[in-house]
Amino acid sequence: MNQTGIIWTEATWNPMSGCEKVSAGCKYCYAMTLAEQKRGTAAFPKGFDLTIREHKLKEPFKLKVPTLIFTNSMSDLFWDQVPNEYRHKIVDVIEATPQHEYQVLTKRPENLLKFSKERKLPANFWAGVTVEANLNRNRIRTLQEVEAEIKFISAEPLIRELDLTDHTDGISWVITGGESGNHLWDQTICDNRALVYYDRSEKKWKPRPERMDWIRNIRDVSIDKGVKFFHKQWGGNYPEAAGRTLDGKTWSEMPRYPGQKQEIDNAYLRHLESGGVIPKGKKEQLLMFSV
Ligand code: SF4
């Protein structure tokens, strides 16, 4: 269990790692880059090849404070190579720790759908798909067939327009975000994929006005359809390089929060934005676990 800079969650849990690229959004996969850089080390002996970390199955039980947990930030639980019995072990842990909420994202919703027919997904299993462009909206259609209490869409990195007008039935939450990383210093890549540009005179990353409209459209559809909306970042050489404000405010809606069945910003958001404090004991709990 790790602390994380991903502001729509509170902790990451990686009981496995490894994946393969599946579509354009994967091109600069941060998880793959990190794991391959560390190939041969104790943390990633096999780089981004499938690595089962069974000892990590115990971690959520040790975390006493109800927590939002992004599950498998370093892989895709529904990648074909993941043994199905190990998927079940992970979901057994999720089911046995209802005090936590688990955010599970995939680009392979057909495998998620198949799995959801094998066993009922626990109420604290948030089923999400990553969708980077209109071209990948079929993932949402498949997600809509899955039975899960919370279903969500992560449009990050958003690299083309995404019209969700007819794609919100049964969806509780939409996250948006632009690409980030040092590869965006390459002008061609930046022009092709980023929501931002680098203003050389001001030495600042800024949102591209015409691509801000992509996010506005998603926000407006979300509001119109009663879907919670969270804009995470515009992107740049690092995630917050151009901030995350849209039309003068930050958008941080969540479908619910662990331990409280109500809408509330998460602890890190309160901490980052208003100087609020992380709930007593939570930070210490998260720091207990090794990377
Ligand atoms: S599906 Fe996710 S983890 Fe897998 S390669 Fe693509 S971006 Fe990386």
Image: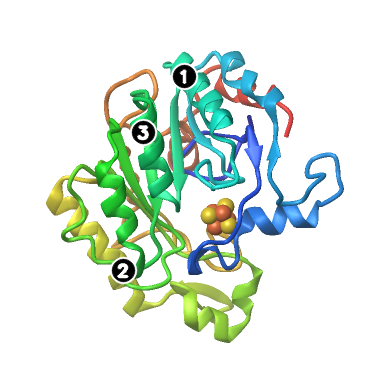
Classify mark 2: residues with Cα within 10 Å, few (<14), some (14-19) or many (20+). some
Q: Which residue is mark 3?
A: 116
User: What is the distance, in whole Å, between disc 3 and disc 1 at their CAs?
Assistant: 24 Å
| Numbered disc 3: secondary structure | helix
Left or right: 265 as drawn, with respect to 86: left
Disc nearer the start of the sequence (3/1): 1
Instruction: Check the picture and name the quadrant holding the C terminus.
Output: top right
Q: Is residue 200 visible?
A: no
**Residue 185: image x %, image y %?**
63, 78
**Residue at 68% from the left image edge and 45% from the top image edge:** 50
Depth check, mark 3 against mark 1: the one in front is 3
Q: Which residue is mark 1?
A: 66
**Residue at 37% from the left image edge and 23% from the top image edge:** 122
Q: Between residue 84 and residue 286, name the one nearer to us.
A: 84
Left or right: 217 as drawn, with respect to 268: left
Left or right: 248 as drawn, with respect to 184: left
**Residue 48: image x %, image y %?**
71, 51
Q: Between residue 52 and residue 195, name the one nearer to us.
A: 52
Q: Is residue 91 visible?
A: yes
Cβ of mark 2 under 8 Å from ligand 1: the answer is no
**Residue 276: image x %, image y %?**
46, 32
Classify mark 1: residues with Cα within 10 Å, few (<14), some (14-19) or many (20+). some
- What amino acid is found at the position of numbered circle 3 in the picture? Ser
- What amino acid is found at the position of numbered circle 2 in the picture? Asn
Above-or-below relation of 149 to 96: below
Cβ of mark 1 under 8 Å from ligand 1: the answer is no
Q: Which residue is mark 2?
A: 134
**Residue at 32% from the left image edge and 20% from the top image edge:** 260
Q: Quadrant of ligand 1?
A: bottom right
- What amino acid is found at the position of numbered circle 1 in the picture? Pro
Q: Residue furthest toward the left? A: 224
